[in-house]
Amino acid sequence: MKEQRIDHRKNYYVVLDTETCPLDKDFGGVSPDNMWVYDLGFAVVDKKGTVYESYSYIIRDIFIGEAELMKSAYYADKIPMYWKQIKEGSREIKSFYEAGAKLKEVCKKYNVRAICAHNARFDYGALNNTQRWLTKSKYRYFYPYGIPIYDTLKMASDTIGKQKSYIKFCERNGFMTSHKKPRPQLKAETLYRYMTNNPDFEESHTGLEDVMIEKEIMAKCFKQHKKMRKALFE
């Protein structure tokens, strides 16, 4: 996409999403400590969700280098689609190192205020886990040093999730948790269904496409102008 001019008076953010395959398919449960990243999407956006640059990388080290493990990925049925899009040029194959270098480059270029993800603990853990395995723990952290990590799940929980209209939307459409005391779901898919008034919307479950949903959730949270938790580690 064509790059837009940088306005240094603005705050810029990176919104990021990953797709993963399990290291041990018999591990049980979904833990970032058991995941390797094969699809990484991220975009530079402002508070309103305007996109300035975006990237969609298929991680060669995992997607090709661990082809057998890829068969146990939750969305393994998408592998033929990925190959088709790679051949068409709509996605790029990059090494994990190259993907990380590009993330660092755009963060520096835009003086990024924070890196955001929905349920950021998962993406943070899975990216670090992949980094440590590929470098034999020589390098342990994937994210550029010193940049705050925001979790749009926390942000939405403190803003959209408390709105009466959202609660009613979830109750009406069956988007409630399965706890003893059910609460409205806060999954990105459910939040976007509410925001677009489309209860049938389904996430793509591919990195960059899901980023385009999550950056809208982030923008909606900022638009509320209410006190909210943002940082993953707080």
Image (cartoon, grey):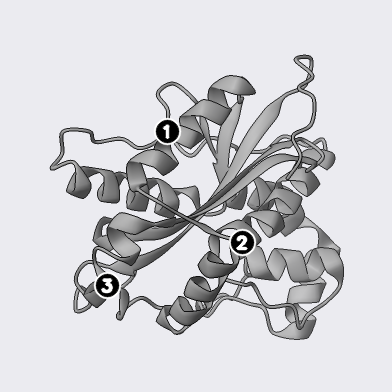
Image position, residue 170 (x, y; %)? 74, 75
Tag 3: Cα neighbours inside 10 Å, few (<14), some, or many (≥20)? few
Q: Nearer the viewer, mark 2 or mark 3?
A: 2
Q: Secondary structure at mark 1?
A: helix
What is the quadrant of residue 9 in the picture? top right
Residue, disc 3: 67
Can residue 209 be seen here? The reply is yes
Tag 1: Cα neighbours inside 10 Å, few (<14), some, or many (≥20)? some
- Going by the image, does 93 lie left or right of 6? left
Label 1 vs 3, first from the N-terminus: 3
Can residue 31 be seen here? The reply is no
Instruction: Check whether the beta carbons of the residues at disc 2 and disc 3 lie within 8 A of each other.
Output: no
The residues tagged by marks 2 and 3 sit, at their Cα atoms, a distance apart of 21 Å
Using the image as rendered, state which of residue 145 and residue 134 is in the foreground.
134
Q: Nearer the viewer, mark 2 or mark 1?
A: 2
Residue, disc 1: 101
Q: Amino acid at mark 3?
A: Ala
Q: Secondary structure at mark 2?
A: loop
Q: What residue is rendered at 60% in x and 21% in y?
A: 109
Using the image as rendered, state which of residue 72 and residue 200 is in the foreground.
72
Q: Amino acid at mark 1?
A: Ala
Q: What residue is rendered at 24% in x and 36% in y?
A: 140
Q: What residue is rendered at 58% in x and 30% in y?
A: 114
Image position, residue 211 (x, y; %)? 63, 54
Residue, disc 2: 90
Instruction: Check whether the beta carbons of the residues at disc 2 and disc 1 lie within 8 A of each other.
Output: no
- Going by the image, does 188 lie left or right of 220? left
Q: Amino acid at mark 2?
A: Ser
What is the quadrant of residue 39 in the picture? bottom left
- Going by the image, does 102 lie left or right of 68? right
Q: Is residue 101 placed above or below 17 in the rendered structure?
A: above
Label 2 vs 3, first from the N-terminus: 3
